[in-house]
Image: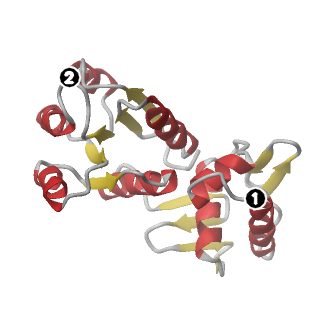
Amino acid sequence: MGSWGTAARVLVVEDEAAIRESVVDALDDAGFRAVGRADGEGLEDLLDGFRPDLVVLDVMLPGRDGFALLGVVRGRSDAGLVLLTARDALADRLHGLDGGADDYVVKPFLLAELVSRVRAVLRRRGRVPSAMTVGDLVVDDEAGTATRAGAVLDLTATELRLLRYLVEQRGRTVTKNQILTQVWGYDAYDPNLVEVHVSALRRKLEAHGPRIVHTVRGLGYALRPAPEEAP
């Protein structure tokens, strides 16, 4: 996990099981605490009990649709709200935004894009800080920079996304497929792509200190602070 402490809570309301489960898994992998529901039944109790920091809400739901549930969320909670829909008409987007949604994602979408939108909404609401720190490493999302031991790292956009993800998962082992999903958006790429980018990232990090991105043989990678930096 990153350095901000308790994970932000995200509620996903989506009736298509495959989409719901993949979104919940992607959010969990990104360091959030996510739960999924197939419809809006009992939403009022869930808002009071789970107290989400953000709700990902499908527009096309059985029973009360997403626009109706948007009103329920806004009436009971100050949670951020991201709408999902297959309808890409401007009128629908404006309806959602005028109703209090913070953002709007049209299906089909990349999981990495949705996670990024969720993080951006939470950051604007002060729930996720811009900068994350691990030992002498600082990754600042808002500035789009990373430094180690005070030195600015010359990272590509992909390397910065990869580093941010590893920092978010600090101490946890993440697989190549998880990295592909979170950094590139889906897992259809050759996993060797991950190895190439991890190697390049390591060279830049280790120019300013000991190794902190470790290979976990047969599993994936883990970012851990150097021993002298560990709490």
Quarter of the image containing the C terminus? top right
Q: Which residue is mark 1?
A: 190
| Image coords of residue 135 (percent x, y) | 67, 58
- Measured Cα–Cα span from mark 2 to mark 1: 44 Å
Residue plotted at (28% across, 54% down): 104
User: Eyeballing the image, is 25 above or below 148?
Assistant: above
Amino acid type, callout 2? Glu
Front residue of this view, candidates 205 and 133: 205
Q: Quadrant of residue 60?
A: top left
User: Could you tell which of marks 2 and 1 lies nearer the N-terminus?
Assistant: 2
| Image coords of residue 209 (percent x, y) | 79, 69
Crowd class of label 2 (few under 14; some 14 to 19; many from 20; radius 10 Å): some
Q: Quadrant of residue 53?
A: top left
Amino acid type, callout 1? Asp
Residue plotted at (82% across, 62% down): 211
Residue plotted at (49% across, 48% down): 4
User: Eyeballing the image, is 134 above or below 150?
Assistant: above
| Image coords of residue 9 (percent x, y) | 40, 36
Q: Is residue 133 visible?
A: no
Residue plotted at (51% across, 38% down): 22
Quarter of the image containing the N terminus? top right
Checking the image for residue 44, the label placed there is: 2
